Amino acid sequence: MAWDAVSGTVYLSEATSCQVDAVDAEGTLRVVIGNGCNDGLAIPGPAAETAIGAPQGIAVHDGDLFVADGWRAVIYRIDARGTLSIFAGTGNQGAPTAGPARESSLGDVGDLAVGGDTLYFTDRVNHAIGAIDLTSGQLSIVAGNGQEGVPARSTRTGSCSAWTSAAWSSGLRWPGRSAAR
């Protein structure tokens, strides 16, 4: 679930229905993305008319809705006009790599959260947390080394390091912002 504080709209991710719904400030329910069919990678264009896999995490930033589709290994962006584009991922499962987000493989993308001009995501299969700069589209790995395990604490900084292992990463939250799930 995500909330757009500007419009008062609440977004609901429905993995079993293969769609994301919105309830506006007046209580009107509408489909934002997904036609109820799980027919492969979404085709860029009108979001409500395309098939998607299983939407998981959702986040809102400056009127754009971001939707994680773990089954399809992508993150979609739906703009204020309702147009869908693939924001990150190639549609092929794999480990995320630093560089242009659209050219990187992703695994089972779960939760999303926005902090400043950065979209954070969990990749549960690859045991990582990634970050995508919303201005440049550049992806970086901020935590996890691809190995499952309990995150270790750095003895130098006392914080989780990008070189530690991460278990089943989920549940991202960013203070003061709408959160994923």
Image (tube, rainbow, N blue to C red):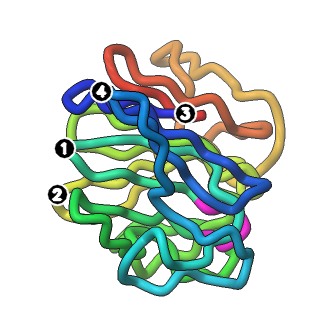
Q: Name the N-terminal-most of marks 3 and 4.
A: 3
How far apart are the two marked residues, 3 and 1, measured between alpha carbons?
17 Å
* Foreground of the two, 168 or 151: 168
Around disc 1, counting alpha carbons within 10 Å, would you say few (fewer than 14), some (14 to 19), or many (20 or more)?
Answer: few
Query: Which mark is drawn over residue 135?
Result: 2
Q: Name the N-terminal-most of marks 4 and 2.
A: 4
Residue at point 69% right, 25% down?
152
Residue 179 vs 21, above or below: the answer is: above
Around disc 2, counting alpha carbons within 10 Å, would you say few (fewer than 14), some (14 to 19), or many (20 or more)?
Answer: few
Give the number of the mark in front: 2 or 1: 1
How far apart are the two marked residues, 4 and 2, measured between alpha carbons?
24 Å
What span is colored magenta in the figure?
A: 69-73
Q: Secondary structure at mark 3?
A: loop
How far apart are the two marked residues, 3 and 4, measured between alpha carbons?
13 Å
> What residue is pinned by disc 1?
62
> What residue is pinned by disc 4?
8
> What residue is pinned by disc 3?
1
